[in-house]
C-alpha cells in the first residue's frame, strides 16, 4: 500500500529543523560539484571562506555589514509572504528608499542637527520604499494585476528613474561619475568601530554601522507585528485563506496594501545601511542584488525573524567569505556566491518538499503508521 | 528618399532586436499556456547564450553552438519542470532560482574556462550566424519603396531571424490547430478535466516546458552568436522579462505577442537614435524613459486600463492528482 506522505504529520524538530538543514546541505553539495568542475577543492574553499568571514575583526565587521542588508530584505519578503504575496520588488523598493534618503539629506543636511537628521533619513527610506510598494499593492488589490509581474516591472522602472535622476538631475556639478555630493557628516550613521571606540574598544575599521542594531530592532517589531497584533492576525488569516478572512470581517484589500507597504518600508531600510551608513552619498546600483537575496534569506529562514537572522548571517558569511575566496583563488569569482544563492533558492524554496517523503519513510520505520495517522 | 532609408534602417534594427524577444515570448507562451508560470526565460536565455558562445569558440561551428544552446535551455526547463510539476513547488521561486543560478554560473564558468573576465573569446564569422542575402535582393533594389524595403529590411538578416518568424507561425499552428495544442491549452485552463479525460497532466506540462526551453535556447544562441560575436556577462539585460511583458501584452496569444515584441523592439531601436535629439514641443526625451516604456505599458495593461489581459486560468497552480 502506498501512503500519501504529505498528509502524515512530522514532529517539529524534523519539519522545521532537519528538512531545512537537509535542503541547504543539498544546495551546498551542488555548489561543491560546481567548484570541483572548475578545479577548486571545495573543502579548501570552505576553509578560506570561514576564515575570510570570521578570521579577524575587520572580516567580522564586513560579514555583519552584509548581514544587515539581508535582514532588511529578508524581513521585507517574509512580511509579504505571510499575506500570501510574493514581493520580488525589494530591489526596486530599496533603490527608491535610497532616493528618499538622498533627497532629504541633500535638502536639509546643512541645516538640521544629527539628532533630527538620522530619524528623518530612516523615515524617508521607509516612506519611499513603502510608496514604491504601494502602487503594485493598490493595483493588485483594486485592479487584480498580479503582484509578481508588477513588482518585477517596478524594479526596472525604478532603475530607469534612478539612472535618469543621477545622470541628469542629482549629479554633483562638474563631476563625471553619476553620484550626488557627499552628505554633511552630521547625516552619517555612526560606524560601529567609532561607537565601540567611545566605549574604549579598539576594532579595525569596517563598513559595519549602527544599522545592524536598527535591523535587529526591526526583527523584534516584525515578530510582534505578525504574531502579537490584530493587524498581524488579519495578515496571516488573509494569507492562509482570503475567503475565511472575508467571512471573519477582515478586508483583504486593506491587508494587501498594508502588508506590501510594511514590506516596501523594510526593503527601503537597505538604504539606511548603504547610503546613511556607508556611502554617505546617493549612487547607482547600491542595492547590488540584496533585494533578490532577501528572497533566499526569507525562504531559508522560514519567514520567521529568528530564522531570517540566521539565514542573513549565513549569506553574510557567503558574501564576505566569497570576496576573500575570489581574492585567494584566481580561478574563482564573487559570482560563485550568486550561483550558490540560486541553488539555495532552488532547494530551500522550489524543491523545499522534495526530501519530505524520504524523511517520512525513515520516520515511519521507527514509529508504526497507526500511531502517527489517526484511523 | 533619405527619410525613407532612415526609417528603413530603424525597421531593420527593430527586426534584429525583436528576434530574441519573439523567440522568448513564444517560449513563454508554451509554458504559461500549459499552466506553468515562467519568469526564468531570462536565465535560460543567459545560460544558452553562454553555452552557445563557449561551444562556438571551441569548435568553430555555429550549428553545434545552436544545438548546445537548445540543449542547455531544455535542461534548465526540465529543472523548472521537476520543481514545479513533479514536486509542486512555487513556480515563481523556481524561476527566480534559475535566473540567479544562470547569472552566477555563466560568469563563474566563463572565467574558469576562458579567463577573460567572464567573456567568451570573440567568434570568427565561421562560428557565427552571418547575414543572408535573400534571392533577388540586389535586383529588387531599383523598384521604388518596395525594393529598398525588401533588400534593406526583409533581406540581409541571419537565419535565426527568419527562424523566429517561423516560430511564431509554428506556435500559432501548434497551439490552435493541433490536438497537442488543444490539450496544452486545456491543461492550462482546467487540468482536472484533462486528467479526467485520461491524459497525463504532468506529461503534457513537461512537453510544453521542454518546448519552452528549446525556444529560449534559440533566443540565447541568437544573442551570443548572431547579434553579437561573444558572450558578455549579463548580456540578456532584462530581455527575458521584456519578452514576458510582451507575452502578457499579447494576452498569451502568438501573433499579438509577436506584435508587442516588435513594438518593444521598435522603441529600443528608436531610443538609440533619439539620444541627444531634441523633438519639437516635447524637447529631449530621456533615453531612460523610452527604455522603461515597455514595463510601464505592461503595468498599465495589467491594471486593465487598456483592455484586459486574462491569464490562463490554472497558471501558477500546482496540479495534485486525486488519489
Image (cartoon, coloured by chain):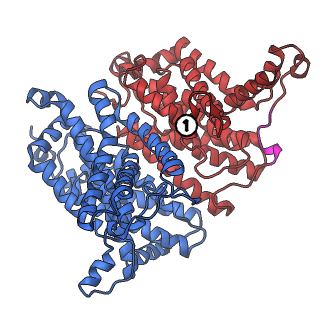
Name the residue at the front extreme.
A111
Residue A8's place in the image compared with A278, above or below, is above
* Residue toward you, A375 or A343: A343
What residue is at 52 percent from the left and 27 percent from the top? Answer: B246
Does the segment drawn in magenta span residue B42?
no
User: Residue A107's quadrant in the figure?
Assistant: bottom left
Does A365 sit left or right of B265 as displayed? left
Residue A56 occupies which quadrant of the picture? bottom left
Q: Which residues are magenta?
A: B124-131
Chain in blue (letter):
A
Q: Position of residue A316 (x, y in %)?
A: 37, 66
Residue B257 in percent (x, y) is at 54, 22
Question: Where A84 sits versus B111, above or below?
Answer: above
What is the quadrant of residue A195 in the picture? bottom left
Under circle 1, the secondary element is helix
Which one is nearer the viewer's eye here, B26 or B246? B246
The residue where tag 1 is placed is B291
Chain B, colour shown: red
Most frequent secondary structure within the magenta stretch: loop
From the top left corner, tell me how far across and down residue B112 is, in percent: 63, 63
Amino acid at each position: 500500500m502506498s501512503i500519501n506522505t504529505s498528509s502524515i504529520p512530522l514532529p517539529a524538530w524534523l519539519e522545521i529543523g532537519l528538512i531545512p538543514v537537509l535542503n541547504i546541505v543539498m544546495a551546498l553539495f551542488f555548489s561543491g560539484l560546481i567548484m570541483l568542475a572548475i578545479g577548486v577543492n571545495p573543502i579548501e574553499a570552505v576553509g578560506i571562506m570561514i576564515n575570510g568571514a570570521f578570521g579577524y575583526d575587520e572580516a567580522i565587521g564586513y560579514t555583519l555589514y552584509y548581514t544587515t542588508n539581508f535582514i532588511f530584505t529578508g524581513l521585507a519578503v517574509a512580511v509579504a509572504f505571510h499575506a500570501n504575496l510574493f514581493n520580488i520588488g525589494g530591489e526596486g523598493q530599496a533603490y527608491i528608499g535610497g532616493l528618499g534618503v538622498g533627497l532629504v539629506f541633500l535638502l536639509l543636511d546643512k541645516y538640521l542637527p544629527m539628532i533630527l537628521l538620522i530619524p528623518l533619513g530612516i523615515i524617508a527610506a521607509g516612506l519611499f520604499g513603502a510608496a514604491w510598494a504601494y502602487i503594485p499593492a493598490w493595483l493588485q488589490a483594486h485592479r487584480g494585476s498580479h503582484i509578481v509581474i508588477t513588482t518585477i516591472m517596478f524594479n526596472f522602472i525604478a532603475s530607469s528613474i534612478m539612472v535618469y535622476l543621477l545622470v541628469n538631475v542629482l549629479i554633483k556639478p562638474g563631476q563625471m561619475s553619476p553620484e550626488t555630493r557627499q552628505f554633511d557628516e552630521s547625516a552619517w550613521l555612526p560606524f560601529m568601530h567609532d561607537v565601540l571606540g567611545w566605549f574604549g574598544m579598539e576594532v579595525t575599521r569596517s563598513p559595519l554601522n549602527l544599522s545592524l542594531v536598527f535591523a535587529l530592532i526591526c526583527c523584534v517589531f516584525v515578530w510582534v507585528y505578525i504574531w502579537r497584533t490584530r493587524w498581524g492576525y488579519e495578515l496571516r488569516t488573509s494569507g492562509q485563506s482570503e475567503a475565511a478572512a472575508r467571512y471573519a470581517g477582515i478586508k483583504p484589500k486593506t491587508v494587501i496594501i498594508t502588508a506590501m507597504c510594511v514590506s516596501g518600508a523594510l526593503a527601503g531600510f537597505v538604504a539606511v545601511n548603504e547610503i546613511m551608513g556607508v556611502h554617505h552619498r546617493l549612487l547607482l546600483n547600491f542595492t547590488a542584488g540584496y533585494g533578490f537575496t532577501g528572497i533566499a534569506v526569507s525562504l531559508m529562514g522560514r519567514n520567521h525573524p529568528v530564522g531570517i537572522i540566521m539565514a542573513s548571517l549565513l549569506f553574510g558569511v557567503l558574501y564576505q567569505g566569497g570576496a576573500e575566496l575570489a581574492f585567494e583563488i584566481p580561478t574563482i569569482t564573487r559570482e560563485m556566491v550568486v550561483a550558490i544563492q540560486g541553488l539555495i533558492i532552488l532547494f530551500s524554496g522550489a524543491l523545499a518538499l522534495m526530501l519530505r517523503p524520504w524523511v517520512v519513510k525513515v520516520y515511519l520505520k521507527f514509529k508504526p503508521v497507526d500511531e502517527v495517522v489517526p484511523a | 528618399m533619405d527619410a525613407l532609408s532612415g526609417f528603413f534602417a530603424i525597421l531593420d534594427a527593430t527586426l534584429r532586436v525583436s528576434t530574441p524577444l519573439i523567440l522568448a515570448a513564444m517560449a513563454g507562451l508554451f509554458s504559461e499556456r500549459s499552466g506553468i508560470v515562467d519568469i526564468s526565460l531570462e536565465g535560460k536565455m543567459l545560460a544558452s547564450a553562454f553555452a552557445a558562445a563557449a561551444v562556438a569558440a571551441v569548435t568553430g561551428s555555429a550549428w553545434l553552438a545552436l544545438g548546445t544552446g537548445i540543449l542547455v535551455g531544455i535542461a534548465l526547463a526540465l529543472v523548472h519542470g521537476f520543481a514545479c510539476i513533479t514536486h509542486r513547488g512555487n513556480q515563481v521561486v523556481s524561476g527566480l532560482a534559475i535566473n540567479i543560478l544562470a547569472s552566477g554560473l555563466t560568469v563563474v564558468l566563463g572565467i574558469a574556462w576562458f579567463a577573460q573576465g567572464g567573456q567568451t573569446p570573440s567568434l570568427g564569422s565561421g562560428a557565427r550566424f552571418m547575414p543572408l542575402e535573400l534571392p533577388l535582393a540586389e535586383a529588387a533594389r531599383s523598384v521604388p519603396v518596395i525594393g529598398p524595403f525588401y533588400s534593406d529590411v526583409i533581406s540581409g538578416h541571419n537565419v535565426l531571424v527568419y527562424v523566429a518568424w517561423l516560430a511564431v507561425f509554428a506556435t500559432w499552428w501548434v497551439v490552435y490547430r493541433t490536438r497537442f495544442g488543444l490539450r496544452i491549452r486545456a491543461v492550462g485552463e482546467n487540468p482536472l478535466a484533462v486528467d479526467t479525460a485520461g491524459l497525463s497532466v504532468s506529461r503534457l506540462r513537461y512537453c510544453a516546458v521542454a518546448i519552452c526551453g528549446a525556444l529560449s535556447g534559440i533566443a540565447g544562441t541568437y544573442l551570443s552568436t548572431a547579434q553579437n560575436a561573444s558572450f558578455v556577462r549579463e548580456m540578456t539585460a532584462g530581455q527575458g522579462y521584456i519578452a514576458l511583458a510582451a507575452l502578457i501584452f499579447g494576452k498569451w496569444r502568438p501573433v499579438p505577442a509577436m506584435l508587442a515584441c516588435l513594438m518593444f523592439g521598435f522603441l529600443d531601436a528608436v531610443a538609440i537614435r533619439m539620444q541627444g535629439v531634441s523633438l519639437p514641443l516635447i524637447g529631449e526625451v530621456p533615453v531612460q524613459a523610452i527604455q522603461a516604456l515597455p514595463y510601464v505599458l505592461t503595468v498599465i495593461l495589467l491594471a486593465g486600463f487598456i483592455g484586459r489581459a486574462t491569464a490562463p486560468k490554472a497558471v501558477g497552480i500546482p496540479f495534485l492528482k486525486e488519489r
